[in-house]
Structures are given as structure tokens and as C-alpha cells.
Image: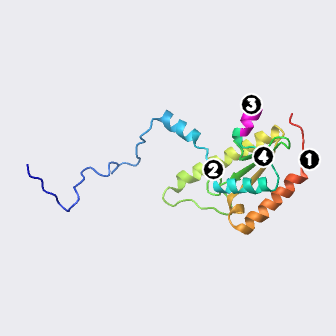
Amino acid sequence: SIRTFSTRPPIRRNWPRNRGRSQVHDVMTPVQRRTAMTHNRGRTKPEKELGRALWRAGLRYLTPAGFSRLAGRKLVGQPDLIWSRRRLVVFVDGCFWHGCPECKGIPRGSGEFWRTKIEQNMARDRAVAASLVKDGWVVVRIPEHALRTKARFVRTTAALVSFLRSTTSRAVA
């Protein structure tokens, strides 16, 4: 048989497949998606940098995995940095995801969806903080923009180091 090769790309019929539909179907089942998302607990760059700076300053902390391994339980809200003897936790909040008032910005295309999502995140943040405070923990929330530039990073880290060194070490109940 004779084959001819054209320089024109082949015509794709019915492409893109989601034309005329508002949603793209997921290739995973809901259970698979939930499992994948619960395992996605990568530490963010600002969180890692803050942790390194605090470690260099001699302030040893636990991550949620380390705390659950040592204490045999998880803390509500999965704090980013944990000092169990001081009963102190630090959350490094992404400005977009946690509705930072200084860095407000909601995408125009699907603004209502994001507004609802961010309001739910903020309500969850308040509930988590209230639960931890009720259990005797001190909750510190650091917005991402406080770590964005070098000057802000140094200022925020110094303030946090000073605060951590001024808190007395309390025994875990």
C-alpha cells in the first residue's frame, strides 16, 4: 500500500471534548480524588523558609507528622509549626487562600465561586483557632505577605523569635 504524508495536522473532530459543557469531568473517582488530595500536604516555600530560619535560631519545632508520631494524636487544623512544651502553634497562611485583607484579589471570571470558597476557609480558620485556644494552645497566624520580601521576612522572623523566647515553657497537659 502507498502512504502519503501531509504537512497539515490531522483534523481533530469533537475536540476539545468539553465544548458546550461548563464542567470538565474528572478522570478520578471521588474517593480517589479525596485520597489524592488528603495526601497532598506539601510544605509551602514560605513555611519551609520560616522553619529553616527558626531552626537556625535554635528554636526546635515539630511538623504535624512529627507531632502525631510523638503525641499519638493530631492537632485540629494541622498547624505548620508546633511547639508542644510551649503549647504554641504557628500557621503560615497563603494570602489568596485565607482572604488576606491587605492582598485581596479574587479572579474575575469565577468571582462568586472563589468568594464563597475563601469565606469558607476563613470560617474554618476561626473555628480551628477557637478550638485550639479552648484546648490551651497559643495560636499565631502569619500571612504569606509578611514573608514575601527579605526585609519583611527578617522583621517577621525576628518578632517571632523574640515572642517564642519570651514565652515560658509549659508542661504539656
Q: Residue at x 78, y 56 (%)?
A: 56
On screen, residue 112 versus residue 58, left or right, reads left
The numbered disc on residue 168 is 1
Task: State the quadrant of the C terminus.
Answer: top right
Q: Amino acid at mark 1?
A: Thr
First in sequence, mark 3 or 4: give its number. Answer: 4
First in sequence, mark 2 or 1: give its number. Answer: 2
- Element carrying mark 1: loop
First in sequence, mark 1 or 3: give its number. Answer: 3
Q: Is residue 59 above or below residue 74?
A: below
Q: Position of residue 61 (x, y in %)?
A: 78, 46
Q: Which residue is mark 3?
A: 72
Q: Position of residue 36 (x, y in %)?
A: 53, 39
First in sequence, mark 3 or 2: give its number. Answer: 3
The numbered disc on residue 119 is 2
- Cα gap from disc 4 to disc 2, whole angstroms: 30 Å
On screen, residue 162 versus residue 119, left or right, reads right
- Residue 41, image quadrant: top right
Q: Which residue is mark 4?
A: 61
Question: How are the residues colored?
Answer: rainbow
